[in-house]
Every structure is written in C-alpha cells, then in structure tokens.
Image (cartoon, rainbow, N blue to C red):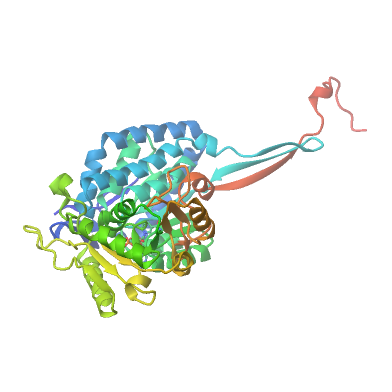
Amino acid sequence: MNTIGHYVDGSRTQGAARTAEVYNPATGAVQAHVALASAAELDRAVEIAARAQPAWAATNPQRRARVLMKFVTLLNRDMDKLAEALSREHGKTLPDARGDVQRGLEVVEFCIGAPHHLKGEFTDAAGPGIDMYSMRQALGVCAGITPFNFPAMIPLWMFAPAIACGNAFILKPSERDPSVPIMLAELFEEAGLPKGILQVVNGDKEVVDAILDNETVQAVGFVGSTPIAAYIYERAAAGGKRVQCFGGAKNHMIVMLDADMDKAADALIGAGYGAAGERCMAISVAVPVGEDTADRLIEKLVPRIEALKVGPYTAGDDVDFGPVVSAAAKANIERMVQSGVDEGAELVVDGRNLKLQGYEEGFFVGPHLFDRVTRDMEIYRKEIFGPVLSCVRAETYEEALGLAMDHEYGNGTAIYTRDGDTARDFAARVNVGMVGINVPIPVPLAYHTFGGWKKSMFGDLNQHGPDSFRFYTRTKTVTARWPSGIKEGGEFSIPLME
Ligand code: NAD
C-alpha cells in the first residue's frame, strides 16, 4: 500500500518509522498510509528552508510574482486531477473539491500583486535634509498547520502570501488528506519556485510541537479546532513567534419575518448541508424571528432536506454532499444528535441510519434538522461539524441578535431581510468577524481578509487580503539624513585638516 511521505528540498521523501492510516471516507477502507515526521525530520526541513530563503527574498518581487503567475496556470491545468485526489481523501463532491482549489487559487492571483503590496511608505523632507521611509521585509522561515476540511484552499491561503513576501514555508497539513498539499508543492516548483522554499512535512502533534519549539521558525499560521488553536497560540507566542490561529465556529443565520422565505430556505440548505456541514463557515443555527416566521421556514426546509442526495463523489452531479471525514467524526455527530433528542429538541428530520447500497462501511451521515433548540443544549453550544441544522426560535430581533452575540464563537453570521435598516443595524452591532446580508456563507474574496472574532480567532491579523502581507513581513523604518554634498561644488584641492 502507498505511503505518502513528505516533500523536502524539492523531492518526495519517505519519512521515518511512524505512520497513520488515510481512509477513503466513501468506502471506509484504508487507501494509503501517511508518514508522521519526527522532530529531527522537521528540524532538517527548517535548516534547508533557512538556507534557501535569503536568495528567494533577494529575488525582486516582480520576478517572484511571475512564478506565482505560472503557478496559477498550472493549478488550472491540473484542476481536475487535484479535485479528484482531494475528493478521494476528503469525501466532498467533485464540484466542491474544484471550489476548494479555486478559492485557494484566487489568493495566489491576489498575491501576484506582491510588488504593489510590498511597497513601503515614504516621507520626503521630514526634517532638514531628512527623509523617512519604511520597508516590508520577509520574516525568514514560516510554518502553517492546516485542517482536513479544505486541504487545498487553506494551505494556499497561507503559503501563497508567505512565499510572495520572500519567505520560505513549511506546511504541516492534516494527516487525514495529505495528498493534495504535496501535489501543490510540486506544481509550485514546476512553476519555477526554488527548492526548499515550500516544503511539506506530514505528521501529528509531535511535528507540530517541533514547529512551535524551533527557534528558526519566525511565524506560525494555524487553522483547525479551537482547543488546538488556543494551545498553538500560547506555545508559539511564548516562544516569541508571530502567530495567527483560526478556530471553530457556530454560525447563526437570522431570518426576519419580511425575508424571502424560499431564498432563505435555499440558502440554509447550501450553507447548512454543503460539504456535509464540514465547513467553518457552515450555517449550523437558523434563528427565525417570530413563531409564524419559524413555522413558514420549517415548512420550506423539510421537503428540501428530504430531497437531498447523499453519496460518494464518484456518483457525479447526482450527489449534494458526501461522507464525513472519519468514523470518529461520524460517531461524534451521532452522539451529538442523540444528546439533542435527550435534551428535548424536536428532531424534525432524522438522518440517522442512512445506508447506501455498496457503501455500507462509508462514513455517511444523513441530513438532520432540529427545531425548538435552546441556548443550554449541547447541540447549540458546541460545534457539531456535520449535516445538522438547529433552529432556535427568537421572539424579537434583539433576542436573535443576542444569540449570535452571546455565543462563544464569532466566525460568520448572516441575516435575511428586505429591510435595509435592520440589515445595517445587524452588520454594525454584531460581534462576529464575517457578516452576510442575504448571503448565507459570507466568505470574503481573496482581496479582502478572512477571520472570525471571539473563540474563532487568536491573534491580530487575518488571512489573505492586505493583512496577509502584514503578517508575513516585518516593517523596518529608516530615517536618513544627507548633509549637503557634491551639488554645492566639487573639491579639487587636497582637503587640509584646519
Ligand atoms: P484539528 O484541530 O483536529 O486539526 C487541525 C490541525 O492541527 C491538523 O493539522 C492536526 O494534525 C493538528 N493537530 C490536531 N491535534 C493536535 C494536537 N493535540 N496538538 C498539535 N496539533 C494538533 O481540526 P480538524 O478536525 O482538522 O478541522 C476541523 C476544525 O477546523 C473545525 O473546528 C473547524 O471549524 C475548524 N476550521 C476553522 C476555520 C477557520 O478559518 N476559522 C477553517 C477551517 C476549519
């Protein structure tokens, strides 16, 4: 059976002894093993990166940008190949896998503007004969630790700006779907990236801790669950590194009584069940305002949910969403559903016991809808990360807003209404990082920044957009004085020391 190793110094390498299993979530079968690097293997990759980085940083930004341009061409060339490898290990449908690559590729496109983004500031004549200017300089070696749910997009969000800024980057992808990150590194080198600038080191906690403790690593980006985000933030920051950690989510969609109920229901279907709910921007809580709104919304949702088709990515366009990533994820979702039932929520659509002929061992979970969920229930408080939508009925707009405000997570939220005043008030007051107005999954485009608030983000600067150029560079400010010189006239006789 194939063992997926690492990508170090321009080649695929085998890795030492420890490995983990990589599943095909649709069949439940082990399809490969992935090497789990030791601290020594990580340290070696960092040394290689540190040797390669100065020449890359000294390559002018326009030339670096040309490598990114070629990389975009190659990503488009291999889009189908990347999507297939991604679906095979993650389980998401092929169109969704193409979206995963595409939303990453758009950040590479944004980073082609590196020469512009890296321009510093300049003050002419800050004093007599004095100019002041700032430069943005690369940090050196940076590292990223990424989750299973976007194995192309999130690595690209991290390493594209880091490398465009002149850094070297070590990527530690999720051990559940490790194939695509290595394919991305190979493509980047085919585009002209020098060896050692992008390396992929697979592994688990051992290699993550080695990254956090390595003194050469200057910055760490993390995306994943909140407890690990908090851990990584603390340990890396204590070591003096620059850190940004993006955590879990519980995204609310408020539905006002004047909303177009068909559009709101359609939005909830895509945002709640797309990718089997395994998205940090999934809407997992619908908050209809008013009993009548809630009844109308549930009436619209039920037939739509019952019509959803669940299946393997190989079934093509017939499938709305695939399996969840692992047997453990499936077991956790089923346990949470049971806790919702036990705590008194009304299970309107029950997706348990879904069986697909020929895929009995796959990690499939049918769609669920809970109504009359309350604040104290576990299914409301915790992230489920599965195809489970909870409806929390609110009596007023203020109560609905309060639900989104009081939840510990603050990644994304949305409001459906025809009233501009309500929408403006919601956008201004809600303490959540990304807001949709009649848009269900408000994932900002590459040239804006992405990041949540509260327990969804630890750090200061967001991913992609202008923040990414700030995160992956350091500012140096130069104050220069030039006393009057040759323009006053040349000295032709030998100067005398009098
Ligand atoms: P995870 O936290 O289990 O794993 C993320 C990464 O951390 C992986 O590379 C993993 O190997 C590593 N890791 C796991 N346990 C570790 C430990 N004890 N010590 C050190 N490293 C460890 O997350 P996941 O299951 O891969 O991804 C799903 C989670 O990611 C969800 O909570 C989701 O909301 C979140 N997510 C957040 C965003 C965002 O932008 N806020 C985006 C995508 C996913």
Viewer-proximal residue among 282 and 243: 282
Viewer-proximal residue among 142 and 317: 317
State the image coordinates of residue 11 (x, y, percent, origin top left): 29, 44
| Count of numbered badges drawn on the protein | 0
Tell me if residue 491 comes above or below residue 323 in the rendering: above
The answer to whether residue 177 shows anywhere in this view is no
**Residue beneath the point at 25% across and 43% down:** 82
**Residue beneath the point at 52% across and 50% down:** 471
Can you name the residue that lies furthest to the left here? Answer: 358
State the image coordinates of residue 419 (x, y, percent, origin top left): 47, 52
**Residue beneath the point at 49% across and 56% down:** 422
* Ligand 1 image position (quadrant): bottom left
Asked where in the image residue 34 lies, by quadrant, the reply is bottom left
Can you name the residue that lies furthest to the front here? Answer: 292
State the image coordinates of residue 146 (x, y, percent, origin top left): 36, 56
The answer to whether residue 145 shows anywhere in this view is yes
Q: Quadrant of the N terminus?
A: bottom left
